[in-house]
Amino acid sequence: IMRNEQIPGQGFCSFLFCLFLLLKGHGFYPDFFVFNGSCLYPIRQRKEGEQRMQHTLPDSQKEIVVALYRYLMMSAEQLARLLNYDLRTVYNLVSRLRKQGWIRDVGLGFLGHNHRAYTLTFEGARRASLLVDRQFRPRVWKNRMVGSERLYYTNEFMTQLMVWSEEEPNEGLVEWMGPAEAAERYVLFDRETGKKKIRLKPGAVGSYVFSGAGRLLFHLEVDMASASIWGMQDQLLDYGEILYRIWGNEQVKNIHVFVMAANSERMRHMRSLWRHLVDGMLLGKPLPNVWFMTHEEFHLGGPFYSRWTNLGNETVTLRDLPLLPLNREQKDLAWLGKRQRCSPFLPSPRGEGSGEVSVQNPR
């Protein structure tokens, strides 16, 4: 027989527990308490333990974790290109991080049997957010299988740029923003409420420096045959309505949007959609340069020899495109993917700078 007895303080504890569940459900992890199944206790000890665990990670493993946090999902080959590690070293580091619960495998069935990439676990991503000092967003990591094909080809394009730049000692990729950082670059604020609005969410944003010429600033959108083509139309509309407001009427003429279509039929359709936007909703607005190419064309020619096509049927390579001037800070950025063993994320032991690839001010 169970008796209904009132325990002193029971109502207040129940209130705290319900508040905790509510906050946790919305992705917040309160700093003042945590529920261990029977009672509430201070969280400070747990957070200090997590920070000690992060500090004990070797720099090589931290680089893997930070790369996966920024770019969401990468194959071993892509990690090796970005971090300048031997492929066997990447496999060893990945194996250790997997055993520690930081990362998990993602199957790449579209490439064939036994192809895989890696992404952070939900808990690994939460801990990684402390490493990069960024707010943790639970919704991004609850189902990391979504969009794996698009992520793979986006990161393949960016890391292939690094490989091809090795032939040129005085040029290369100096900036690469993943989806989260790219979206934050183009945050808008509501005039009435002051709240942030994120409309434009590029697949990636990059800056490639040509020695003595300037920098090529581009946004990359990778199309998949299984995706709705109307989603790409909405994305192109956002590019047309937002980029000139950030960069200005003159500079936007030297900003580029690359659309890599799944096949020639979808490329033809997307060019038609862009034409209707240019002649309709975007008529009279200063617009960025939008270029189209298929996956097959990119794989045949690589980043520098493939030719992009615009609405006027002009075909160009990357070296033919108009560039932005280099500012002083960008001249000092480290090349990404060059063969010196210098982390793109962590400070150099020789004090040569962090090699940070993210630029807060887009100008």
Image (cartoon, grey):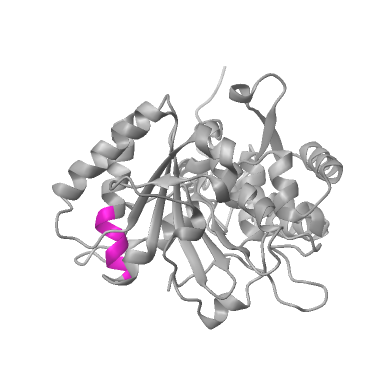
- Residue 346: % across, % down: 73, 65
The answer to if 22 sits in the magenta stretch is no
Dividing the picture into quadrants, the one containing residue 249 is: bottom left
Q: At x 67% / y 70%, what residue is drawn?
A: 170
Is residue 215 or residue 244 the one in the foreground? 215
79 lies left or right of 71:
right
Is residue 46 or residue 121 the one in the foreground? 121
Q: At x 70% / y 57%, what residue is drawn?
A: 337
Specify start and end residues of the magenta stretch as a single range.
240-247
Placement of the N terminus among the 4 image quadrants = top right
357 lies left or right of 203:
right
Q: At x 22% / y 43%, what residue is drawn?
A: 275
Number of disc labels: 0
346 lies left or right of 32:
right
Q: What is the chief secondary structure element of the magenta stretch?
A: helix
- Residue 310: % across, % down: 34, 47
- Residue 19: % across, % down: 45, 46
Dividing the picture into quadrants, the one containing residue 114 is: top right
Placement of the C terminus among the 4 image quadrants = bottom left
Above or below for 7 versus 351: above
290 lies left or right of 98:
left
| Residue 72 seen in the figure | no
Q: Residue furthest bottom?
A: 328
Is residue 50 or residue 84 the one in the foreground? 84
- Residue 80: % across, % down: 75, 47
Is residue 213 or residue 155 the one in the foreground? 213
